[in-house]
Amino acid sequence: MSKWFYLNLVILLLAIWKVVNHFSFPVLSITILFGFIGFLFFLFNWTRNAVFSTIRNNPDRKTKIKLANLSKKAMPFHRWTGTLALVFILLHAGFILHWYGLSFHNLKMVAGLVALVNLLLMVLTGWWRLFKPTGKLRRIHLLLGISLFFIIAIHLLL
Ligand code: HEM
């Protein structure tokens, strides 16, 4: 199994831990709920990377085929789940900015804004690949995914 499965599990547990320890839990403010839903949509799509990475490194042909079919099934939704992640994060950011105001002294907010720009670029390159399916764009999309993963982890930890 790819190391990405373990990393994805770690970030999922981190997000759950942060949400259940939030002062508004268990009622949960809509702000936190939208952040968490956006995060789940991102992670659903990012798990595709873990599946591909396993396909590349697994010597068993049967497992490779099984995983490739699984990934193919999720593919028609990939662009839409990514776009939904962006919609929920925009709502999350909108509520945060409404309640707290914009502050560059708040590092959690700064990391969140960087993650938002990264996510926006990810969604844009994802749609762009529909019209221009080049290897360069695929690599850029993948690199944006890796950086988004770590920026979200920082956002959650701060
Ligand atoms: C991909 C982008 C983002 C994801 C996945 C995300 C996810 C989350 C999650 C799950 C939480 C609740 C857990 C915690 O407190 O750590 C949270 C909290 C928070 N987020 Fe985000 N977020 C994103 C972008 C943003 C943006 C753009 C902003 C700023 C405009 C922002 C500002 C905040 C703040 C200030 C909190 C703490 C709120 C509080 O404690 O009441 N986030 N985020």
Image (tube, helix red, strand yellow):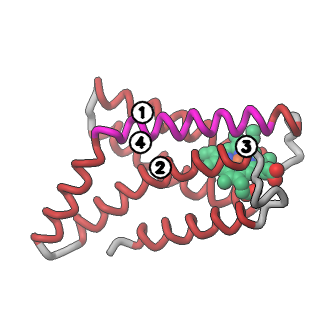
Q: Amino acid at mark 3?
A: Ile
Choose between 19 and 45: the one closer to the eye. 19
Q: Which mark is on residue 30?
A: 3
Disc nearest the viewer among 3 and 2:
3
State the image coordinates of residue 89 (x, y, percent, origin top left): 63, 39
Q: Is residue 88 magenta?
A: yes
| Local crowd size for mark 3, using a 10 Å CA cut-off: few (<14), some (14–19), many (≥20) | some
Q: Is residue 72 left or right of residue 143?
A: left
Classify mark 4: helix, strand or loop. helix
* Quadrant housing the C terminus: bottom right
* As drawn, 64 above or below 97: below
For marks 3 and 1, the one nearer the N-term is 3
Whole-percent x and y of residue 40? 53, 52
Residue corresponding to mark 1: 125
Mark 4 vs 2, N-terminal side: 4
Q: Earlier in the sequence, mark 1 or mark 4?
A: 1
Alpha-carbon span between mark 1 and mark 2 = 11 Å
Q: Secondary structure at mark 3?
A: helix
